[in-house]
């Protein structure tokens, strides 16, 4: 059973097979090893039967180890000099403790091994699925996560490089037990390819230069995902003005780039009136406006649309998976620039629901565009709302760079979202939304103001958005600390991470399953 997927300019063939890779002519075989179980591993025993004392020495010295992140490569010279196999290389991947093994750890162990195989110019790779099973990780999980990691672990952003990397993995075989029927597992493979590709799409958008990834180009990319199952609408300035979206349009005033409101609708259960809305902050460049950022602070602000990128990309995966539920995605896309007509501190704007907002800080723009997006989601019938945004620097101070911050008004729905993220390897931690915090964004001249001051900045920013939620169950995900990585580690490649995509897709899956 073979599937093809596009990886940059490379078409990768990925299939499920039950061949014996040891006697194949593949470039590389990847074998997973749990810490403390190296000598008991059936895959290791199979290789040891071929290599004899050579492998025994590596095991006894600890060079072949199941310690997380430890990758040891057995090269062609040793293989071909001691056996008749055509297999050129074996990489043993350390998986860490079996008890703490998870889907995230699987991806983090597999990705560096895949990159190492690519670095030795391997074009064909086999992955021994059986050796990656954990206490709570079965065959379908291994297949899905392996397919994802073939996308995300091998990701490179080379769009604007004149000389692109020449080494690429083009053929991946996931080796399954001989008694398994590949056709019964193809859905897990397809799901993994859809999600992995969507994570990379979100990365591409957030890595793209801001003179290329503009509100208009984001809208064009969204339109490109449109199909018979996914309706895409693009609203311009006049449409937003007609709807009364003064909060969004106020942010857009300082930019020469026209704002776009991207609406993507998937109705997979037309017999249900329930609608979940995914909202993503789409600030394609954030200078801070007249409350301008420092030069250093502006350096990564092309990625201030990472929330919008996650929502757009998640819809791409959802439409491929076709869950039985109704989803609308809304991405308010604009720049925040200090042009001659930019809004000023002290201005008052009016949101779509009639709420008047004093502009206390022009660099608190994400909550403004999302306020109007929440109002539109309610107008479109949403009774559950998740917004995703690189909203505040304060979330990094509160939680560091290990998890996403969550805020919500419904304990059950917030818990569902958190567990949906955790189960796919995106850590989420809930912060409080006590009513007392709302006093911090009270205004003397308008209904509210767009800044709650320094204290509890991540909380007051979230609660500002929550002010517009009406009666809907609402969760805000602040991904500001998780949207970009300064280093390559595990599955994460330096640059945009695609944070939030997997959580949104899994929320859709869970809601579809529980509504049956």
Image: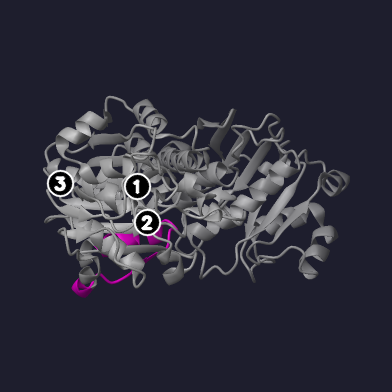
| Whether residue 396 is situated above or below residue 504 in the rendered picture | below
Query: In the image shown, does 358 or 331 lie closer to the viewer?
Result: 358
Q: What residue is pinned by disc 3?
A: 378
Say if residue 313 shows up in the picture.
yes
Query: In the image shown, does 321 or 311 lie closer to the viewer?
Result: 311
Residue for point 81% across, 48% down = 75
* C-beta proximity under 8 Å, tags 1 and 2: yes
Q: What is the secondary structure assignment of the residue under circle 3? A: helix
Question: In the image, which disc is placed on residue 391?
Answer: 2
Residue density around tag 3, few if under 14, some if 14–19, many if 20 or more, within 10 Å: many
Is 107 left or right of 250, judged from the image as shown? right
Residue density around tag 2, few if under 14, some if 14–19, many if 20 or more, within 10 Å: many
Residue for point 79% across, 70% down = 60
Q: Earlier in the sequence, mark 3 or mark 2?
A: 3
Q: Residue furthest right?
A: 81
Q: What is the secondary structure assignment of the residue under circle 1? A: loop
Say if residue 176 shows up in the picture.
no
Residue 325, position in %: x, y? 21, 42
Based on the picture, tell me whether residue 418 belongs to the magenta stretch.
Answer: yes
Residue 170, position in %: x, y? 63, 33
State which region is magenta: 414-436
Q: What residue is pinned by disc 1?
A: 281
Based on the picture, tell me whether residue 369 belongs to the magenta stretch.
Answer: no
């Amino acid at each position: 059973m073979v599937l093809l997927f596009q990886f940059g300019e490379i078409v990768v063939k990925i299939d499920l097979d039950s061949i014996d890779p040891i006697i194949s002519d593949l470039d590389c075989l990847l074998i997973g090893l749990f810490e403390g179980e190296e000598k008991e591993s059936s895959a290791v025993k199979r290789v040891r039967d071929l290599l004899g004392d050579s492998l025994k020495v590596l095991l006894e010295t600890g060079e072949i180890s199941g310690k997380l992140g430890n990758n040891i490569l057995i090269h062609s010279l040793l293989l071909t000099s001691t056996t008749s196999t055509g297999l050129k290389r074996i990489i043993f991947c350390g998986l860490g403790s079996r008890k703490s093994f998870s889907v995230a750890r699987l991806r983090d162990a597999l990705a560096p091994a895949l990159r190492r195989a690519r670095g030795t110019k391997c074009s064909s790779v086999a992955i021994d699925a059986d050796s990656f099973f954990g206490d709570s990780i079965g065959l379908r999980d291994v297949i899905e996560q392996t397919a994802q990691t073939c996308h995300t672990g091998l990701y490179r952003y080379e769009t604007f490089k004149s000389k692109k990397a020449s080494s690429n993995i083009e053929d991946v075989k996931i080796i399954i037990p001989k008694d398994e029927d590949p056709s019964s597992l193809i859905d897990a493979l397809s799901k993994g390819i859809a999600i992995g590709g969507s994570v990379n799409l979100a990365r591409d958008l957030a890595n793209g230069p801001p003179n290329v990834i503009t509100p208009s180009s984001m809208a064009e990319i969204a339109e490109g995902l449109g199909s018979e199952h996914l309706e895409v609408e693009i609203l311009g300035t006049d449409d937003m003005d007609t709807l009364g979206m003064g909060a969004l349009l106020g942010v857009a005033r300082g930019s020469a780039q026209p704002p776009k409101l991207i609406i993507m609708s998937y109705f997979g259960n037309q017999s249900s009136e329930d609608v979940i809305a995914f909202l993503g902050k789409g600030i394609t460049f954030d200078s801070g406006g007249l409350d301008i950022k420092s030069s250093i602070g502006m350096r990564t602000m092309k990625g201030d649309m990472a929330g919008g990128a996650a929502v757009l990309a998640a819809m791409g995966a959802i439409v491929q998976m076709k869950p039985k539920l109704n989803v609308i995605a809304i991405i308010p896309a604009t720049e925040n620039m200090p042009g001659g007509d930019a809004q000023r501190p002290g201005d008052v704007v009016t949101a779509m629901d009639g709420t008047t907002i004093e502009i206390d800080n022009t660099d608190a723009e994400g909550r403004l565009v999302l306020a109007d997006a929440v109002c539109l989601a309610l107008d479109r019938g949403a009774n559950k709302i998740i917004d995703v945004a690189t909203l505040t620097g304060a979330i990094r101070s509160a939680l560091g760079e290990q998890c996403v911050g969550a805020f919500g008004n419904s304990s059950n729905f917030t818990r569902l979202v958190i567990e949906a993220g955790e189960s796919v390897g995106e850590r989420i931690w809930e912060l409080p939304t006590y009513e007392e915090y709302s006093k911090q964004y009270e205004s003397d001249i308008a209904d509210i103001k767009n800044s709650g001051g320094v204290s509890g900045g991540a909380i007051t920013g979230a609660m500002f958005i929550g002010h517009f939620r009406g009666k809907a169950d609402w969760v805000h995900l602040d991904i500001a600390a998780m949207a970009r990585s300064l280093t390559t580690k595990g599955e994460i490649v330096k640059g945009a991470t695609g944070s939030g995509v997997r959580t949104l897709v899994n929320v859709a899956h869970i809601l579809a399953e529980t509504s049956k």
